């Protein structure tokens, strides 16, 4: 019976000339009601029929000059399309182009209607919910693996994201204030970074204060501070347990070697004593070009950034270590406590930055590690910032910092900058069973491999009407960009 009613209603939806606007509105409302709950597929026939009815209403209302009905039609069509886009994102069989198109048109429709009404903060929460879904999914699609979009396409996407973020931030009872902590952080990460990136692509865009955005988030309890803004914090979830004794995890942007503990300090001193041998091996590897990979997260906005990983998530990369036996041998000999090689956050890699490279302000995924840089080739003009401290490298010198704090890198010199990066387990977590690598990757490494996007997908599913399960998010994960959090 339900299918028959949908068919009868849909069969008359396109015939706008033979119906009044009021009749079309009643028909569209009925189709929308019948389509409610069919968030099963981006190509849901019921929702396609409802969208067709709203389009017919809009066309008729525009012809007759009934602006209020135009606004209502666009608003409902936008919400319907946004819901379809969100549903399609979680549908294994959905085409990503269809998802992106539904989200894009839906967001534009809702935003137009809200601007027409002139009082976006007073709109129902449902509208902001749809904008939230749209902004998350557009961002994920924009950052997904595959060919990088052209500057014009990226600018269009970022402009839509900025608009939806502004609507969300203006709302007194917006979805960001009610969502789980992880989702709130992800929303603010997007909303603070997208406008900054847009201003790079379109210098004529209205100015945006990313620092003010971060401060606003910190004031609302989204992050510990305006500078420390990871997507997850140690101690908040089973995937990132805190110290076994219940103590706190030290948070400081820049560290001294002694603050890592005597064993970690000994590792760093041993590497520092052999920095010239490490440098010579890295330079020889650079000439051979084997093992080097381009940074894949698109964190660098210009130039060229390559990495050669020796340990990743505490696991030795045997092929690359065969290319760098001196450095790998030193690490194995020095790290007797396994603070790098025995924990799932452990990383050792060479990082090479070409002149003209800029790495945008960003943070690491969580605060379970502390990062050390050993300078190998450090030309003038290369530097970086951690929180509010501007730093530089020196050959044979160490710089240690917590990458859960905002940091950015620039290279205005004339030759490649080359460093060795070593990630240690946070001293407060050393030896914790959850982070120790026993056989293969540890549980926290598996979470990090899947990427923070998987966590976001689970949060979005949970917020959808009707909820969702973690298994749905995991099933969807292979369709997303499953990239490791790379190091600089």
Image (cartoon, rainbow, N blue to C red):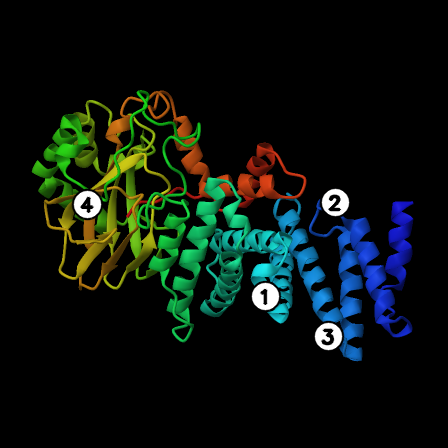
Look at the image and tell me whether residue 331 can be seen. Answer: yes
**Between residues 354 and 394, which one lies in front from this camera angle?**
394
Dot 3 or dot 1, earlier in sequence: 3
Tell me the SS state at disc 1.
loop
Q: Dot 2: within a 10 Å radius of its alpha carbon, few (fewer than 14), some, or many (20 or more) residues?
A: few
Q: Is residue 372 left or right of residue 174?
A: left
Dot 1 or dot 4, earlier in sequence: 1
- Give coordinates of residue 365: x percent, y percent: 37, 42
Residue topped by disc 3:
67
Of circles 2 and 4, the one toward us is 2
* C-alpha gap between disc 4 and disc 3: 67 Å
Instruction: Tell me if label 2 and label 4 are in contact, CB under 8 Å.
Output: no
Picture disc at residue 282: 4
Above or below, 475 against 414 in this view is above
Quadrant housing residue 261: top left
Residue topped by disc 2:
37
* C-alpha gap between disc 1 and disc 4: 59 Å
Specify the quadrant that holds the N terminus. top right
- Give coordinates of residue 457: x percent, y percent: 54, 42
Instruction: Tell me if label 4 and label 3 are in contact, CB under 8 Å.
Output: no
């Amino acid at each position: 019976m339900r299918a028959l009613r949908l068919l009868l209603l849909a069969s008359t939806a396109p015939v706008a000339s033979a119906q009044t606007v009021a009749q079309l509105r009643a028909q569209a409302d009925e189709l929308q009601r019948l389509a409610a709950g069919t968030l099963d597929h981006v190509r849901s026939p019921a929702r396609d029929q409802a969208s067709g009815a709203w389009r017919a209403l809009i066309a008729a209302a525009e012809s007759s000059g009934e602006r209020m009905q135009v606004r209502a039609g666009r608003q409902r069509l936008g919400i319907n399309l946004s819901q379809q886009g969100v549903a399609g994102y979680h549908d294994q069989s959905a085409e990503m182009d269809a998802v992106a198109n539904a989200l894009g048109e839906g967001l534009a429709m809702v935003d137009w209607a809200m601007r027409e009404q002139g009082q976006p903060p007073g709109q129902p929460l449902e509208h902001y919910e749809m904008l939230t879904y749209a902004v998350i999914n557009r961002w994920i699609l924009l950052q997904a693996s595959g060919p990088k979009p052209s500057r014009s396409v990226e600018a269009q996407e970022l402009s839509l994201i900025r608009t939806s973020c502004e609507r969300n931030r203006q709302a007194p009872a917006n979805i960001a204030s009610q969502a789980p902590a992880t989702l709130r952080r992800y929303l603010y990460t997007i909303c603070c970074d997208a406008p900054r990136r847009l201003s790079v692509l379109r210098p004529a865009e209205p100015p945006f204060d990313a620092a003010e955005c971060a401060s606003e988030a910190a004031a609302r309890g989204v992050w510990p501070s305006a500078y420390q803004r990871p997507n997850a914090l140690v101690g908040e979830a089973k995937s990132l347990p805190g110290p076994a004794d219940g103590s706190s995890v030290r948070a400081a942007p820049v560290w001294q070697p002694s603050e890592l503990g005597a064993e970690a300090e000994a590792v760093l001193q041993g590497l520092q004593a052999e920095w010239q041998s490490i440098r010579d091996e890295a330079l020889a590897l650079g000439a051979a070009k084997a093992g080097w990979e381009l940074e894949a997260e698109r964190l660098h906005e210009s130039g060229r950034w390559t990495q050669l990983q020796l340990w990743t998530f505490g696991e030795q990369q045997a092929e690359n270590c065969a290319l760098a036996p001196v450095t790998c041998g030193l690490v194995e000999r020095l790290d007797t406590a396994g603070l790098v090689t025995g924990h799932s956050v452990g990383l050792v890699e060479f990082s090479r930055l070409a002149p003209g490279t800029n790495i945008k302000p960003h943070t690491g995924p969580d605060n379970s590690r502390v990062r050390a840089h050993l300078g190998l080739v450090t030309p003038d003009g290369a530097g970086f910032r951690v929180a509010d401290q501007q730093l530089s490298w020196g050959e044979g010198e160490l710089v240690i910092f917590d990458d859960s704090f905002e940091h950015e890198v620039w290279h205005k010199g004339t030759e490649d900058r080359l460093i060795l990066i070593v990630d240690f387990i946070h001293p407060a977590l050393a030896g914790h069973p959850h982070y120790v690598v026993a056989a293969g990757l540890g549980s926290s490494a598996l979470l990090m491999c899947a990427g923070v996007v998987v966590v976001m997908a689970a949060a979005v599913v949970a917020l959808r009407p009707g909820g969702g399960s973690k298994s749905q998010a995991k099933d969807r994960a292979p369709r997303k960009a499953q990239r490791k959090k790379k190091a600089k």
